[in-house]
Image (spheres, rainbow, N blue to C red):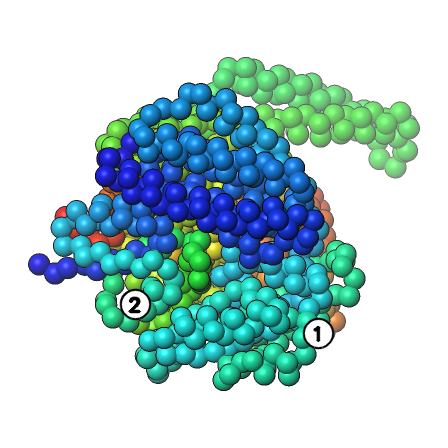
Amino acid sequence: MAPPRALDEFVTEANEILESLAKDLFVLDQERGREPDPERLNAIFRAAHSLKGLSAMFGVDRVSRLAHRAEDVLDALRLGRVPLDDRLVDTLIETLDMLQALLARVSQGTHAPDLEVGADHLQERLAQLARGQADAGVDLLDQVGIDPQMRSVFTEYEEHRLRENVKKGVGLWKVRAVYSLADFDQQLAALNARLKPLGEVVSTLPSSQPGDESSIAFDLVFGSSRARGEIEAVLDGATLSPLTSRPAPTEVTPRPGPALVFDSSSSNAPRPATKWDDVSGSGVALPEPTSASGLRLSPDTSLRSLTQTVRVDIGRLDALMNSIGELLLIRSNINRLAEAARQVGTGVALPKLWGQELQREARALERKLDELQKGVLDVRMVPLGQVFDKLTRLMRRLVRESGKDVDFEVSGGDVELDKLIVEELSDPLMHLLRNSLDHGIEPPEVRRLHHKPQRGKIRLKARQQGNQVLIEVGDDGGGMDETRIRQVAVQRGLATEEQTREMSRRDLLNLVFLPGFSTRADVSELSGRGVGLDVVKTNLARLSGLIDIDSRRGDGTTFTLTLPLTLAIIRALMVGVSGRTYAVPLSSVMEIVSIRHADLRTVERREVFEVRGQTLPFVRLARVFKLAEAQRERSFVVLIGLAQQRIGLAVDELLGQEDIVTKPLGGRLRAIPGVSGATELGDRRAVLVLDVGALMEELTRPAAAAG
Amino acid sequence: MSTHKVLIVEDSRATRELLAAALGELDGVEVHLAVSGFEALKVLPRHRFELIITDINMPDINGLELINFVKKNPHYKETPLFVVTTEGRPQDRDRGLQLGASEYVVKPFEPADICALVRRYLKLG
């Protein structure tokens, strides 16, 4: 509890609050059955809210808890979620009495066990009253088209009042007044007094007057059913303009439908540029493919094992041996059939039975080969636990050294992945975990200020989903600071301010993966992030992996890695371009859409198209490989994604999926950009396999723009 | 030694005093108080504040409106700003951060904790 002198101050202020609360409640009591004045309801709410905050600050829990319950009811009331009835007014008056009694005890310095039961009971009743029905349905404010910039500064209550005005169908206006800094408060009070009889002032927004330091402008959001002339008559120099871009809907029940947002400030702004352009505009090239050692954090933290060997469960080898045994059996059957065919001689028809037998053996061969393939892949598979265990040990040490209070949770260690991938994963995972520990988890005092458990939490989670494995590295820390990311990106020339404003939250977060998005201690000191995340991205891209961030200020950050189960045999989408066939690794294919060429646009001399509001580069595969292009109105576009980048590859035909084994190209063919190797199809035709990562890098380089 | 000016905008007198007393203990920090958003608007041009701490619920203009004003004004927009929100109002927190607040603090808080945070922001030893 606070020192005695401070406690005196608390009692004085709390009494003042209760007095004003009593006055307003008295009026509410008198006016039972009438539509309550929204300003009065808000004043009562504010009183309860202030009392709650104040008593909590001074550790007077008993008062704070009761005030909290009252605040909840009053909040629901002012937001129109519960009706104002006699029961509610009565309960509020009782609560006021109780609060006064409790406060009297505090000022006497005595405890109040006799009041406990009554206070508990009241709290319970208030809690019941607060459980009204919540607002549901479409937001009316979306329909009338309020400038979202303006909306962003409204409190929940102001939004509610605005909504009420929209429901009533009154006109919504913006009153702009410019006053001297010296006496604006009196001027505003006078303006408010003149406006009040004509309607409701919902909000008052101050804004600077450029070039004039001695005055200040205010935008008043004003709802009124009066004619424009009538309002203008009382303005005395202030100007009036309609606030909404569309009239309020005539029926009160809103129609469901997509929310339309009108933003007057950006309607003439250039179309958002794609992330692509941001990267190329900066002139920052992605780093050269990094060697294994180049990816390490520091010599002592690399967890990569030095051996190329795999420890295999003997059961798996037995299964392989079994398959081989059965294959040998099939071989002798086929030998027998071949011998029979030879003895029959040329030009003589073979018996039907022979053909059936051969077919049966062929099917058995196919099945067994599948088994064998799967068996060999299984041998390559190792549980992620191998690397998770090492990470856990290292994290324990790092947590201890950091002096932070952190729980490290690991799950999904039994999920299996190709040995090659597991080995390559340890460094990027360590990097992300370190990031969570160093920059994600807040210092203890900040966690207390945010009302979070003292002990932070870092999670490492893996699960299999179809042919992919998802690995999550998450923390319940401070989350990424979007404003800070925006600033840094602009400072480092990775994007213009305009571009960062147009970006979606996700695109903005993904900026931290750009090389050159820094990283020095001064940047990351305060909830900063992005230390070398570009390295993590490059590392994952080489494993055909994707990385995504989800982060929310205050709630923490989660990185999600999506990886293919194996790199040895991959599923590929076969596509046709200008009569040739190419294989695109399916793990990089996000989706396939059909685009009319008429819908293409050009941004900075690159063709782009839009998918669900996202603008993506449109890359004609025929042009990449300098093939003759057929004239057509539509193309299939294969959306490929690697790490955080997305592009659309335009192709002529889709030829289905196949399992392929990629073989490296030798000799002069080795240097073809955008091709990782070749594969042989069932009909013995060789086709090129696209190297999605290299292709994307090639296409994102500024030099590629002109081509 | 240079002094760091910090502006506290808070309509509750007792909370204001509590904050002022706590921050006043920090060496080199000069605390200025505003009892309302309007008063903050008047005080802002007179000093070069290095940090602003504002409550959300205030009678004249709300804290969000003040943050918006500060962050849009070329003279003040670089000033870090903490927004003080109340338990259970994530919307206030999100809007405050969106409008450019650097930090949020949930009431009730320990004065010592906010001092530690201020100390880090002002890079005091």
Which residue is label 2 attached to? B44
Residue lying furthest left: B1
Crowding at label 1, few (<14), some or many (≥20) Cα neighbours within 10 Å?
Answer: few
Tell me the chain of label 2: B
Please determine whether, in this image, residue A327 is positioned above or below residue B60: above
Q: Position of residue A636 (x, y in %)?
A: 70, 61
Task: Give the amino acid at mark 2.
Answer: Leu
Tell me the chain of label 1: A
* x 49%, y 41%: residue: B88
Compare residues A190 and A229 and report the one nearer the observer.
A190
Which secondary structure, mark 2?
A: helix
Residue A108 badge: none
Q: Is residue A401 shown left or right of residue A699?
A: left
Asked whether the beta carbons under mark 2 and mark 1 sit within 8 Å of each other, the answer is: no
Residues under labels 2 and 1: Cα distance?
54 Å
Q: Position of residue A468 (x, y in %)?
A: 57, 38
Q: Is residue A60 shown left or right of residue A689?
A: left
